Image (spheres, helix red, strand yellow):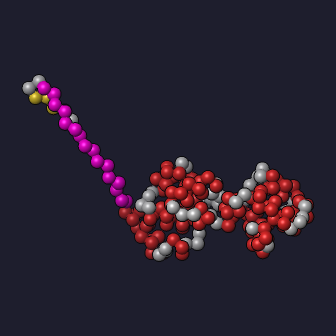
Amino acid sequence: MCRAKDEIVRYAPLCVYRFRLIVPHRLVDAQLCNQQYHSYEEIEDVPARLKWCRHHMGLMQKEVAEKIGITRGHYTKFESGETDYIPSDVADRLAELFHVPVTDLLDEYNSFLYNGQREMLLDCRKRLGLNQRAFARLIQVPAATLQIWESGKKRVTKSSWEKYLRDYIKVNEVCS
């Protein structure tokens, strides 16, 4: 701000304060989350854990997305459960932001990918003493598909993981 008096220009500092407003629907959403879950340990699914952590840090989805370097839409898909794959680097940044172990933010499928699908498949196959063709028959996938998965050229989809690998790897803990 400035003012001229007696041909002298005087400047006064202008202080601008910025306040973050709490939008009512955000408050209601946070209260519902707190009523549903009393502690973080009670939460079974990844989307609910992400939402709980975000609410307890007082952050909006947009702010979380900015802090971890992704778009709001991308983060929203994680929190809504719309996407089934959380890239390892994003999982690491989320865990760091929320101060929780990365393993807490991952379901079985994402843990399988985070730990390295290629390494887990190779290790499982080798521990069982099977070649690629025999292992592919055992898990009921074409040998070419197993070869692509083991090479790391293609990520195992969640539906394929659930159909061919999840139960098998659970039963044979030697492979997990």
Asked whether the viewer can see residue 76, the reply is no
- The number of numbered discs placed on residues in the rendered structure image is 0
Q: Is residue 63 magenta?
A: no
Q: Position of residue 166 (x, y in %)?
A: 75, 68
Of the pair 79 and 25, the residue shown nearer to us: 79
Q: Please say if 30 is above or below 73.
A: below
Q: Residue furthest left?
A: 6
Quadrant the C terminus occupies: bottom right
Residue at image x 54%, y 63%?
100
Residue at image x 47%, y 75%?
38
Quadrant the N terminus occupies: top left
Of the pair 119 and 39, the residue shown nearer to us: 119
Q: Main secondary structure of the magenta part?
A: loop
Q: Position of residue 131 (x, y in %)?
A: 90, 61
Asked whether the viewer can see residue 51, the reply is yes
Q: Please say if 10 is above or below 31.
A: above
Q: Position of residue 50 (x, y in %)?
A: 53, 63
For the magenta stretch, what is the residue range?
8-23
Residue at image x 19%, y 33%?
11
- Res. 25 image quadrant: bottom left
Q: Residue furthest top?
A: 7
- Res. 22 image quadrant: bottom left
Q: Position of residue 32 (x, y in %)?
A: 44, 71
Q: Is residue 144 left or right of residue 16?
A: right
Residue at image x 60%, y 57%?
91
